Image (tube, rainbow, N blue to C red):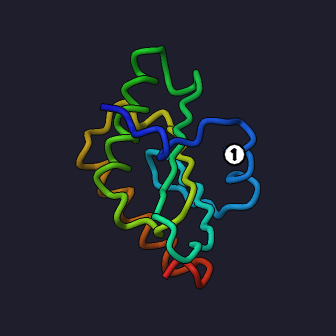
Amino acid sequence: MGLPRPQRLRHTREIQAVRTHGIAREAGFFRVQLWTKEAEPGAETVRRLAVIASRRVGGAVARNRCKRLLRTAFRLRQEHFPPVCDVVLIARRRLAEADIHEVCDNLAKVIERLRKGARPNLR
């Protein structure tokens, strides 16, 4: 089950904007880059995601497994993210051997670190 279209960052320029303007933290198995935006009054909350897994992660099977793990972890923990934000998750080599519980725990911890040490609009 994939993410609905409104929850995906689909264009290179959108991903580059997150990588340029957002804040980043390492999470062991992956890197999180987060760019929060101001919510417009009356607008719905949208948390958009892009997942990057380069060939350094492994072959096609390993890369697809890593992307699937990261999308699932995001889907399970998305309520911890700010209401309007763009997120880029970059897979690391170690992610291929991780299980979903470890990935979800790492994601929750890094989100907490981002909330504590980041801009005021993350709270």
Report the residue at 59% width, 85% height from top.
120
Q: Is residue 112 above or below residue 47?
A: below
Determine whether, in the image, residue 92 is placed left or right of residue 79. right
Q: In the depicted view, which residue is nearer to us: 22 or 44?
A: 44
Mark 1, secondary structure of its residue: helix
Where is residue 56? Give x, y as percent.
58, 25
Give the residue drawn at x 50%, y 73%.
42
As drawn, the residue found furthest toward the top would be: 60
Q: Nearer the viewer, residue 28 or 11?
A: 11
The type of residue carrying mark 1 is Glu
Residue 101, how many percent across, how many down? 23, 48
Q: Is 101 rendered above or below residue 51?
A: below
Which of the pair 56/32 is nearer the observer? 32
Q: Is residue 74 left or right of residue 11?
A: left
Could you classify mark 1 by the number of other residues whose Cα lies within 10 Å: few (under 14), some (14-19), or many (20 or more)?
some
Question: Is 115 placed above or below 9 here?
Answer: below
On the image, the x and y values in percent for residue 122 come to 53, 77
Residue 111 in the figure: left or right of residue 40: left
Which x, y percent locates residue 79?
34, 64
- Number of numbered discs overlaid on the protein picture: 1
Please name the residue shown 38% across and 65% down the image. 109
The residue that label 1 is drawn on is 14
Which quadrant is the N terminus positioned in? Answer: top left
Q: Residue at x 74, y 61 (%)?
A: 21
For residue 111, above or below residue 72: below
Question: Residue lying farthest front?
Answer: 42
